[in-house]
Amino acid sequence: MTQHREHSCHAVGCAAPVPPKSLMCKGDWLQVPRRLREAVMRVYRPGQEVTKDPSPIYVLVADYVVGWLAVRQGRWTDAQLTARVVRQWKLWSAKVSAEDAAFFRALCGTHWTEMGR
Ligand SMILES: [Zn+2]
C-alpha cells in the first residue's frame, strides 16, 4: 500500500483525480444533497486518508452516499443501492456504536425500511 497512489473520485463511473481527503470530485459532490454531504463531513476524521483507517460509520455513510448518487445519475437501480447497503451493514454493524447506528438508519430513510423487510 503506497501513500502516493493516485486517488480518484468514488462516484460510480467517474475516475476524476481528487485529493485523498475528498470522497468525490467537485462536480459529483455538488449533486449530492446537503444533508448527505453534511453526514459525510460529520463522520469524517481528519487524517483518516493518511492513516487509511476510516471509521466503520464513515465507510457505511460514504458507501450509502456514493450509491445514492449512482441511483440519481441513473447508473444503479434503487434495488442495487439497497442490496449494497444491506451487504455493508452486515459487514460493519457490529463495529458501530448505538448512536452511530441510529444516525445511519435515519440517514438511509426509506432504504433502511426496505432493508428491514
Ligand atoms: Zn467524480
Image: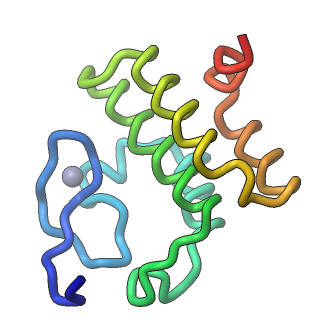
83 is higher (above) or lower (below) than 23:
above
Tell me which corner region of the image, top left, top right, bottom left or bottom right, holds residue 76: top left
Residue nearest the viewer, comparing 86 with 41: 86
Residue nearest the viewer, comparing 55 with 38: 55
117 is higher (above) or lower (below) than 32:
above
Tell me which corner region of the image, top left, top right, bottom left or bottom right, holds residue 19: bottom left
Counting from the top left corner in percent of width and height, residue 25 is at: 25, 60
Residue shown at 23% from the left, 58% from the top: 9
Residue shown at 32% from the left, 32% from the top: 70
Residue nearest the viewer, comparing 22 with 5: 5
Residue shown at 36% from the left, 50% from the top: 30
* The furthest residue to the top: 117
Residue shown at 65% from the left, 33% from the top: 108
Tell me which corner region of the image, top left, top right, bottom left or bottom right, holds residue 2: bottom left
In the drawing, does residue 27 fall left or right of residue 106?
A: left
Identify the image quadrant of the N terminus: bottom left
Counting from the top left corner in percent of width and height, residue 86 is at: 57, 30
112 is higher (above) or lower (below) than 61:
above
Counting from the top left corner in percent of width and height, residue 115 is at: 65, 20
Total number of numbered discs in the rendering: 0
